[in-house]
Image (cartoon, helix red, strand yellow):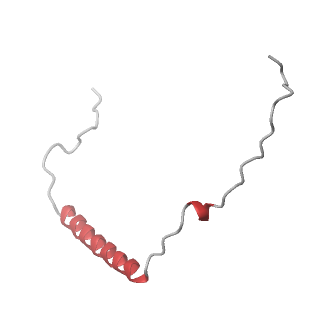
Amino acid sequence: MLQFPATMRQFPATPILPTTTLLPVVAVPQEEEMLLSMAESDLEEKLNDIRKAHSNLMIIGKAGFGVRRRR
């Protein structure tokens, strides 16, 4: 087997395609963005209400759970 065979063909490199032709950008209507932002703000309000409710709960059990004592 020859290191550089005389019959070796040189193929041109493949052209580089821009990403815009590969992955088209889908335009999101402004109304849909508005609906998504409203739903997100509603979710944030619900999560804040849950956090406030959980902060008032009394914790029952060992106070120092996970803390090792030295003897």
Question: Could you tell me which residue is drawn at 65 percent across and 61 percent down?
Answer: 18
Quadrant of the frame with the C terminus: top left
Question: Taking 13 as reference, is 52 left or right?
Answer: left
Question: Could you tell me which residue is drawn at 20 percent across and 45 percent down?
Answer: 63
Locate residue 59, reporting x and y percent.
Answer: 16, 52
Front one among 14 and 50: 14
Name, please, the residue furthest toward the front.
Answer: 7
Quadrant for residue 41, please give it: bottom left
Front one among 25 and 31: 25
Locate residue 10, reporting x and y percent.
Answer: 81, 39
Question: Could you tell me which residue is drawn at 19 percent across and 62 percent down?
Answer: 54
Question: Taking 20 as reference, is 67 left or right?
Answer: left
Question: Could you tell me which residue is drawn at 60 percent across and 63 percent down?
Answer: 21
Residue 70, placed above or below residue 41:
above
Locate residue 12, reporting x and y percent.
Answer: 78, 46
Question: Taking 71 as reference, is 25 left or right?
Answer: right
Front one among 19 and 56: 19
Number of numbered markers: 0
Question: Taking 59 as reference, is 2 left or right?
Answer: right
Quadrant for residue 35, please give it: bottom left
Residue 62, placed above or below residue 49:
above
